[in-house]
Image (cartoon, rainbow, N blue to C red):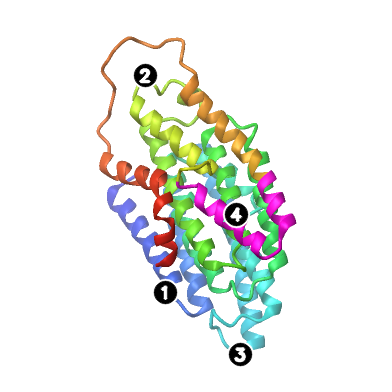
Amino acid sequence: MNPLAMMMFLTSLAIGTTITLSSHHWLLAWIGLEINTLALLPIMTKTPHPRAIEAATKYFLTQATASALMLFSCLMNAMQAGEWDINTPSNLMTNSLSIAIMMKLGLAPMHFWLPEVLQGISLVTGLILSTWQKIPPMILLFQISHNINLSLTVILGLTSVLIGGWGGIGQTQIRKIMAFSSIGHLGWIIIILKLNPQLSLFNFILYTIMTTAMFLSMIMLSATKMSQISTSWTKNPALTTTTMLVLLSLAGLPPLTGFPPKLLIIMELIKQNMFISATLIMLASLLTLFFYLRLTYIIALTLSPNTHNSTIWRTPTKPWLLFSIINTMALTLLPLTPAILLT
């Protein structure tokens, strides 16, 4: 793709996100989301492959449906309340509005588009879709969290964690695994949204950092399948080691960065006397843990039969400083958790 065109599309992504984040008006927030969607479509199809075209088509149809539902909810809210202010949605329209935003995010049971779309696009575009594109809808959910239906968030959160683990078990494609991982993490974020929005935001920030680190690792290893990961040790042992640790961090194992949000969410659910929800979400997360450990096993404990004896690591010229910073944050933020939550 022409660098000038790419810069224009990335600038449009930034502008759309900024409009949504800074708006107090539902129509402006909706326009920002639409700019984001339309800016990402050409980036998805920069490689003219049938899979990429199919992924862009599925993404457009899903986002258009969610946008139509969201605009309908905003119009009905404006008719009832007489205003378009984001902080005053009517209780009647909050449910449909929440479902529209959750469809944009890819929460279960509106998740079917996410694995297929992520599988059809490049790793760099997948990184944008899994992190940057989730910021505007998530911020809108935070803004209406005081009016959102608790039963809706708990049911969709549990369903997302269960499907995120269940769907990822049989996958061999890393992009699909990351899609189901995203669904599972969003379930953890949503289940606590009504009870503690600050904790939900903390979880979302850590999810973004860990997912960015994982996608950067895959980009540097040029790996999209498990079979390609299994041969990465001879290419770059240091990078393969950090990739394994990032996977364990995504699984939520201590003492890595992914552990504190899960611990704090379980503690908050118990404090709210939601013992059944806490038990179910912990059991459902075991499914997710299984496929993370399977990936870790493939990376750390298997070697390709055609390994060579060369001592020279093949390290292509890539943004190592950015990667090092993101990876460090994805692994070592556990001691800083109290300070982050107090800010």
**In the rendering, which numbered label is found on residue 34?**
none
- How far apart marks 4 and 1 lie (CA) works out to 26 Å
Identify the image quadrant of the C terminus.
Answer: bottom left
Q: Position of residue 171 (x, y in %)?
A: 61, 32
x, y percent for residue 340: 41, 61
Q: Return the residue at label 3.
A: 82
Q: Which of disc 1 and disc 2 is earlier in sequence?
A: 1
**Residue type at tag 2:** Thr
Q: Residue at x 40, y 30 (%)?
A: 241
Foreground tag (4 vs 1): 4
| Residues drawn in magenta | 257-283
> Which residue is found at the position 45% from the left and 43% from the top?
256
Relative height, residue 81 to residue 72 (above, below): below
- Closer to the camera: disc 4 or disc 2? 4
Camera-nearest residue between 10 and 185? 185
Q: Secondary structure at mark 2?
A: loop
Q: Residue at x 65, y 63 (%)?
A: 271
Quadrant housing residue 217: top left
Answer left or right for 56 relative to 222: right
For residue 18, side relative to residue 270 (left or right):
left
Q: Secondary structure at mark 1?
A: helix
Sequence-first disc among 4 and 1: 1
Tell me the element at label 3. loop
Mark 1 is surrounded, within 10 Å at the Cα level, by few (under 14), some (14 to 19) or many (20 or more) other residues, namely few
Quickly name the residue at label 4. 188
Closer to the chain start, of discs 4 and 3, is: 3
Q: Earlier in the sequence, mark 4 or mark 2?
A: 4
Q: Position of residue 139 (x, y in %)?
A: 50, 67
Residue 22: image tag: 1
